[in-house]
């Protein structure tokens, strides 16, 4: 079965946004065992959407279209698909109701936006005979149109709406169409660079047939997806198990998860829960990003005691008890300050674990001795504090992002020793 | 003049990498005043590259192909282009020399790689009669093939090679072909929904010829790009000025910037700096994301006093002085608590402005009276506190993201009144 992607949106043609949807959908199609030979991007133009859809239907079985489902005049993906399939647009009563409720709820008491404008009702029209997919994160529903063994899947453009809809509705739909099941495991590694990790398993990658091993580089992490094609789930699991075991033999504790759904922060929260521990944070250059990552995990409220963003020296002294002489003798970005921040935030909050970050994110503030990218991370677990020095490469955003990842990873490694 | 992009690479179809080349090239083409109606991605497959190139030549004037110029058997973009243009491949003596020198230099003293392998010489072949573009960052040269008023531009796939080659050779080439300059302004709006914003200027959008007005929806924001084609820069600026003025007349303070480079947080920091104010934050459900956004802005350290992530009731009382009876009578997610958090964090930090967020991000924790998505934002400026209630739709990440945007926007609006 061959899938083809059509991304609709003039903002893509103007380069205003990067097409991450095509990347996400291509990955998912590969995982589900579908072939994909073409990705097409066109603007919000009726004639051109019809043209590329017609070519796509000639050479591919399932066409996934993203974008152009919004309420504005520009949005015409649904209209174009209806035209190519020779179908009418008809009012979908459940969609109409959903839109009404969405606006009543969202703008209650908000004087800026208190009415559903006329063009919002356009989103309540469906292609006659299609499957309507609810959108829990926006107003544009998705659609599946089937005809003569071909299918068009219409999804909203914003990734925050498209991805949940794809995972809830489209993955099961695509799985049902395949005879093989594809079982995969995502081996997630933190603490080893991409090329080193790949070199370490080059022999496995070169020998691969079924299961396959595909590397995905992520900022500060390396993921290997191990995928097996099988007749049923158990066979698939049996095929991937020895490969995952071999990866554990080679990478050990650098592997933090083999679950698609787990993140570095969710693994840290799980370990904290298992050991009945609480956590507190003190952030300087990362300015809340570390705590923000922890708060990604639903249910973290039970164990996150407090977070302090102590950007200034005064705040470091006042709330964390960092000594004035430490700041004077060693500077705010130093092993000593990171240590006192970690100890101080644990004491102030009464938490039994703590993370503290202090560093120079740039672009200003670097010196020959303390260059941009120098970061100290303090990690306290049950009274014992470790401080690590990092010299990170990249711009301000990159240095901050990597600092957060390495802080989470440092706490994870300490918790594994308990 | 119409440009079309063809990205060649199986790794794009498998979702192993994001197609940032298409984004970069689209932006540049728009800036240079070229229209772009199609972006195509195909794998390293001779037949399919020929097929999409033929369609592209029928509907576009200049085809930019990236990728598939490397030394391996897979790489066949040059061969496919030669075939479609009916040209031979011939040895290019300067390219042959360059490759020889590159390998001598790069692998000097490296025992692993001290010979040019046979397939590297493939990169010294050029399409007969084409322009050869030197590659200063790799071994694959680029090419321009011209025939019957059409042109194909072949560039290497790695952005670190493609971008310098594009900037050195292709921008001058494309500029020479165009007579017009294109000037644009990005009008950025917060506090109005996309469809409402568009309805408000439907007449302008419908009348548009030059300048054009194009809407871009972003999470919680709406952007309109106003672009004029002109004979010179000043004429372009004169053409867009009245349109931007008209947008200001209609949207007023909802417009926070007309600069491509400005963000909501950078505008807030600029306003704080202009009024010599400091800021402090108290976050519950957003857990550091608001402060993290502020810290995006280089130089914020001078005015960001402190940030508190007070997830627990104890922390709200201990650090922010929220009263126990307030929490008992109204709950942690209430107008009263948001107000006391804002007042408390300003007092604790000695800051003259403050933002406080408390809400229910979900997925758990909602009740019929206080559903998931209910958020209160407190904003203090020079002793005066405003609290706004929001009822946001979406998953945990979306509720948190929108809360941060609305908090920044609330502070922005208060600062505009000073």
Image (cartoon, coloured by chain):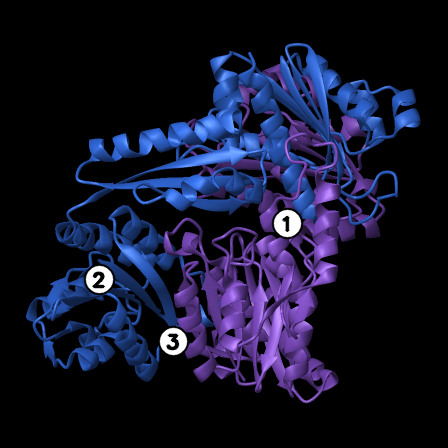
Chain colours: A purple, B blue
Residue at the spot of label 2:
B108
- Residue A329 lies left or right of residue B167; in this view the side is right
Q: Is residue A245 visible?
A: no
Q: Work out how far the residue at label 3 is from the one at label 1, CA to CA, in angstroms.
A: 37 Å
* Marks 3 and 2 on same chain: yes
Residue wearing tag 1: A409
Residues flagged by tags 3 and 1 on a common chain: no
Looking at the rendered structure, which numbered label has been put on residue B252? none
x and y percentages locating residue A187 in the rendered image: 62, 66
Indicate the secondary structure of the residue bearing disc 1: helix
Q: Toward the viewer: A378 or B367?
A: B367
Helix, strand or loop for disc 3: loop
Q: Is residue B360 visible?
A: yes
Q: Which residue is mark 3?
A: B43
Q: Position of residue A328 (x, y in %)?
A: 54, 16
Q: Residue at x 38, y 56 (%)?
A: A13
Question: Which tag is nearer the camera, tag 3 or tag 1?
Answer: 3
| Left or right: A106 in relation to B267 | right
Q: Nearer the viewer, mark 3 or mark 2?
A: 3
Q: Are marks 1 and 2 on the same chain?
A: no
Disc 3: which chain? B
Residue drawn 68% across the image and 28% down it: A308
A278 or A44, which is in the foreground? A44
Point out the image quarter for the N terminus of chain A.
bottom right
- Quarter of the image for residue B159 reads bottom left
Residue A39 pos. (x, y %): 43, 70
Rendered position, B332 above or below B118: above
- For the residues labelled 3 and 2, the Cα–Cα distance comes to 34 Å
- SS state under label 2: loop
Could you tell me if the residues under marks 3 and 2 are in contact, i.e. CB atoms within 8 Å?
Answer: no
């Amino acid at each position: 079965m061959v899938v083809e992607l059509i991304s609709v949106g003039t903002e893509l043609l103007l380069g205003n946004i990067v097409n991450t949807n095509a990347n996400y959908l291509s990955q998912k199609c590969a995982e589900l065992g579908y072939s994909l030979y073409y990705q097409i991007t066109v603007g919000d133009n009726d004639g051109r959407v019809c043209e590329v859809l017609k070519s796509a239907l000639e050479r591919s079985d399932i066409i996934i279209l993203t974008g152009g489902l919004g309420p504005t005049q520009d949005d015409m993906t649904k209209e174009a698909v209806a035209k190519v399939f020779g179908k009418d647009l008809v009012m979908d009563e459940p969609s109409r109701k959903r839109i009404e409720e969405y606006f009543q709820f969202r703008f209650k008491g908000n004087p800026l936006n208190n009415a559903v404008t006329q063009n919002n009702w356009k989103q309540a029209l469906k292609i006659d005979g299609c499957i309507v997919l609810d959108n829990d994160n926006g107003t544009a529903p998705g659609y599946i149109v089937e005809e003569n063994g071909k299918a068009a899947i219409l999804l909203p453009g914003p990734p925050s709406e498209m991805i949940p809809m794809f995972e809830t509705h489209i993955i099961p739909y695509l799985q049902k169409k395949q005879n093989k099941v594809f079982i995969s495991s995502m081996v997630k590694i933190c603490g080893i660079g991409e090329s080193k990790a790949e070199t370490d398993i080059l022999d496995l990658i070169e020998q691969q047939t079924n299961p396959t091993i595909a590397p995905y580089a992520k900022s500060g992490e390396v993921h290997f997806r191990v995928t097996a094609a099988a007749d049923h789930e158990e066979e698939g699991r049996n095929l991937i198990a020895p490969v995952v075991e071999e990866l554990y033999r080679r990478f050990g504790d650098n592997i933090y998860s083999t679950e698609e759904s787990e993140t570095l922060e969710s693994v840290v929260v799980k370990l904290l829960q298992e050991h009945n521990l609480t956590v507190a944070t003190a952030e300087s250059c990362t300015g809340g990003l570390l705590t923000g990552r922890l708060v990604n995990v639903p249910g973290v409220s039970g164990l996150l005691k407090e977070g302090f963003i102590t950007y200034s020296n005064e705040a470091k002294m006042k709330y964390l008890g960092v000594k004035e002489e430490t700041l004077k003798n060693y500077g705010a970005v130093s092993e000593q300050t990171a240590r006192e921040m970690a100890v101080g935030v644990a004491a102030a909050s009464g938490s039994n674990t703590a993370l503290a970050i202090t560093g120079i994110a740039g672009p200003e503030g670097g010196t020959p001795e303390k260059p941009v990218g120098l970061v100290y991370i303090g990690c306290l677990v049950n009274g014992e504090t470790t401080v690590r020095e990092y010299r990170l490469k990249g711009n301000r955003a990159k240095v901050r992002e990597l600092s957060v990842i390495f802080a989470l990873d440092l706490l994870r490694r300490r918790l594994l020793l308990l």
